[in-house]
Amino acid sequence: MKKILLGTTAVIALGAISTEAFAADKIKLELGGFMRHYVGVISDDEASNTGTNNSDRAMSLSQDSNTEVYFSGSTTLDNGLTVKAQIELEGDGEEGGNSTDKSFLTISSDAMGALTMGVTAHASDDFDVNAPNAVGNFGYRDLDDWAQMAANNGNNEAFTFSALRDWNGDNSAKLKYVTPTFNGVKGFASYSAAEGSSASDADNLDRNTTADGSSFGIAYAGDVSGVAVKADLSQTRLNGVNNNVHFGLSVAMSGVTVGGSYVSTKDDDGTDNLAGDGKEYDLGVAYNTGPYTVSASYSWAKNDGTTGVSGDNKDRAWRVAGSYDLGAGVALSATYFNLKRDGEGDGATYVLGKSAQVSGVIAGIEVGF
């Protein structure tokens, strides 16, 4: 009799919630997104695998485009819950033939926080704080890609920044939760059953091809005596073997922002590879006045590289950037960068013991819609 009463109560409660839900407006998707086009002149001092760093200099003209279209909308139910849906489509075919970048649903309220289900990045990606950059689309991972464009035979693919900075995981099916805000502090966590898979029915039954991923941490954003402060501390575990810890801090006042971050990664797969144990930090400053924003930053990275070779892979990078907001969602941008890599060992080839340097100027136009 008690089970019958409990079951009846549950049905009545579910019916009440359903009635409240139908009373709210149906979600209407709105269109948004961005289009970004860049042209760069890149200089590579080691275009061939000689290690001479002088006779092999090459100059190249490179282009890059990044276009995404968003369909998003939300509704607030009569019970106070807000339900938001968002679909992000790639406009440049960058996702290996998969035009869908992200597709997720979020249920939230001030009291419960936010629960997200669907194809997206880990929760740590939403809160990580790094050195400020006037051109938000160009982090050090992006500059790695530009460096590779200049290398005729792919020698510069060994820059360390991609291995360490890409610590938030791929856009794959995830469960993600963010707590309510307590005095500017939020906690967050996320889990993926099949890291690197964007399949809607991702699972981790085949441990030889897929592995789970998770992240958790805390973040702060608030005002301290007139200074805007942001900070995060998180740990991410990817593909069952990579453990990454990230700490970031930035302070801003009167248009000036100073910030930086530290990343430490531990590779537990036991293999002899370049993406093993390592660490990286970056520091930078940015200034904004009216439509103008300028920034300068420095990053240094090291990983242990191949276990059978003495020494470590060490990279450093400078970046100076500026942007000008023309209004109506249109902005012009320019970036100068200089990356240098000192490889481990003392061999005669580029990969072992020979340094390489890539620099370039990138200009572009960014349109938001």
Image (cartoon, grey):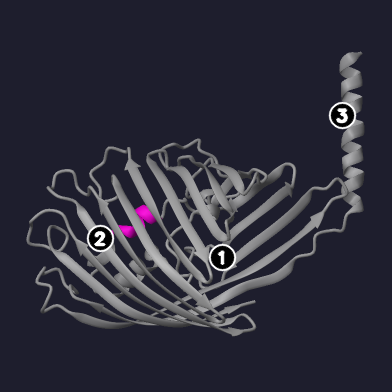
**Label whose residue precedes the other's in the sequence (2 or 1):** 1
Q: Quadrant of the C terminus?
A: bottom right
Alpha-carbon distance for marks 2 and 1?
Answer: 33 Å
Name the residue: 23% across, 67% down. 340
**Label whose residue precedes the other's in the sequence (3 or 1):** 3
State the residue lying farthest toward the front: 225
Does 197 sit left or right of 315 as displayed?
A: right
Q: Nearer the viewer, residue 262 or 137?
A: 262
Name the residue: 21% across, 71% down. 357
Residue 235 lies in quadrant: top left
93 is higher (above) or lower (below) than 278 = below
Local packing at callout 3 (Cα closer than 10 Å; few below 14, some 14-19, many 20+) is few
Q: Which residue is mark 2?
A: 315
Q: Nearer the viewer, residue 302 or 172?
A: 302
Q: Tell me, yes or no, whether the two marked residues, 3 and 1, touch with CB atoms within 8 Å.
A: no
Local packing at callout 2 (Cα closer than 10 Å; few below 14, some 14-19, many 20+) is many
**Label whose residue precedes the other's in the sequence (3 or 2):** 3
Q: Nearer the viewer, residue 80 or 349?
A: 80
> Residue 314 placed where, x, y %?
22, 57
Name the residue: 79% across, 48% down. 81
364 is higher (above) or lower (below) than 70 = below
Name the residue: 74% across, 69% down. 30
- Amino acid residing under circle 3: Ala
Does 5 sit left or right of 121 as displayed?
A: right
- Amino acid residing under circle 2: Asp
Q: Which residue is mark 3?
A: 10
Characterize the magenta stretch by its predominant secondary structure: helix
- Which segment did they paint magenta? 159-165
- Amino acid residing under circle 1: Ser
Any mark on residue 99, and which? 1
> Residue 242 placed where, x, y %?
38, 42
**Of helix, strand and loop, which one carries label 2?**
strand
